[in-house]
Amino acid sequence: MSTEQEQTITPHVPVNDPSSEPVSGKTKVEGAQIGGLFEAISKGRPVESVVYPDGATEDAVLEIDDFNLWYGDAKALHNTTFAAAKGKVTALIGPSGCGKSTLLRSVNRMNDLIDSVRIEGQMRLNGDPVYGKSVDVIELRKRIGMVFQKPNPFPMSIFENVIYSLRIDGVRNKSTLEEICEQSLRGAGLWDEAKDRLKESALRLSGGQQQRLCIARAIAAEPEVLLLDEPCSALDPIATGRIEDLIEDLKGTYSILIVTHNMQQASRVSDNTAFMYLGRLVEYGPTEQIFLSPKLKETEDYVTGRFG
Ligand SMILES: Nc1ncnc2c1ncn2[C@@H]1O[C@H](COP(=O)(O)OP(=O)(O)OP(=O)(O)O)[C@@H](O)[C@H]1O
Ligand SMILES: [Mg+2]
């Protein structure tokens, strides 16, 4: 690795702070010597993310560019910059409260619904700005699917749940609706279990089935990116396995951002992983590298369970 490359991946602390000379060289050792990156972050010092050149892809579905977010006076996201690759799975990991959900909710502008939220910076979805006066938020949200920790089927039939977005768009053709319903349920791995129950209330499905239904509902709208916020945390290991298989199947056709606290899950399902800490992106790169040979000691400690 060249000296220039090493400098670009070095956690940065201000030179005018005598307690923290800027770290240079390989970060795993020197980061620890200054009391660690986590300490620098918790003291509010600026920190430069370690983003691998091959982690930021040319073929990005989502580009996050120097993005900052405040809840009132509290800053929840600091200068976040990275890109999520098209057709790949990007995992967001980090301790509770580090801003993973906030970042995910910023993509489909759900944070707009919170009065105290203020943002700076930009995100781009397939090149189009997510923030700005000219952005039609309703149209933007149609391009993004979101699935939450707790399955949230609507109190209506399985069929109506799946084709919900088409109803909103005024699609009436029965055979089109039936076709998309079947296609989406197949895509979500729920067709065999649901095909004879399409008129039944979705609330009668099990938790794991409900979560797959929510994924079917999201993909029926053909989103450009699918946001999954801890989609398996309320599920048993079998249902979790099914969702993971599903993510594997959807990959390629869909671009997925997934938040998870399950390190095995992140390493199993994702192509790239972003490690966040207290609102900062700490390290971002190919999942294998983040889990097996991260550049920062702090990342290594987190993914191996020695911290958090
Ligand atoms: N609506 C809100 N109003 C004010 N502060 C908020 C709000 N939502 C989140 N925060 C704060 O923003 C920070 C990031 O929260 P966020 O929910 O994004 O974390 P997270 O990484 O998703 O955590 P977890 O793993 O527990 O879900 C936290 O300090 C949290 O208290
Ligand atoms: Mg969260």
Image (tube, rainbow, N blue to C red):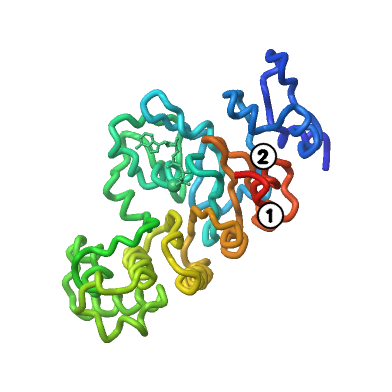
Q: Quadrant of ligand 1?
A: top left
Q: Residue at x 33, y 73 (%)?
A: 206
Whether residue 225 is visible, yes or no, is no
Q: Position of residue 72 (x, y in %)?
A: 36, 26
Residue 269 is drawn in which quadrant? bottom right
Residue 213 is drawn in which quadrant? bottom left
User: Residue under circle 2?
Assistant: 50
Looking at the rendered structure, the kind of residue marked 2 is: Val
Is label 1 in a helix, a strand or a loop? Answer: helix
Looking at the rendered structure, the kind of residue marked 1 is: Phe
User: Residue under circle 1?
Assistant: 291
Figure quadrant of the C terminus: top right
Q: Position of residue 129 (x, y in %)?
A: 41, 41
Closer to the chain start, of discs 1 and 2, is 2
Residue at disc 1, CB closer than 8 Å to ligand 1: no
Q: Residue at x 27, y 64 (%)?
A: 153
In the picture shown, does residue 32 fall above or below 109?
above
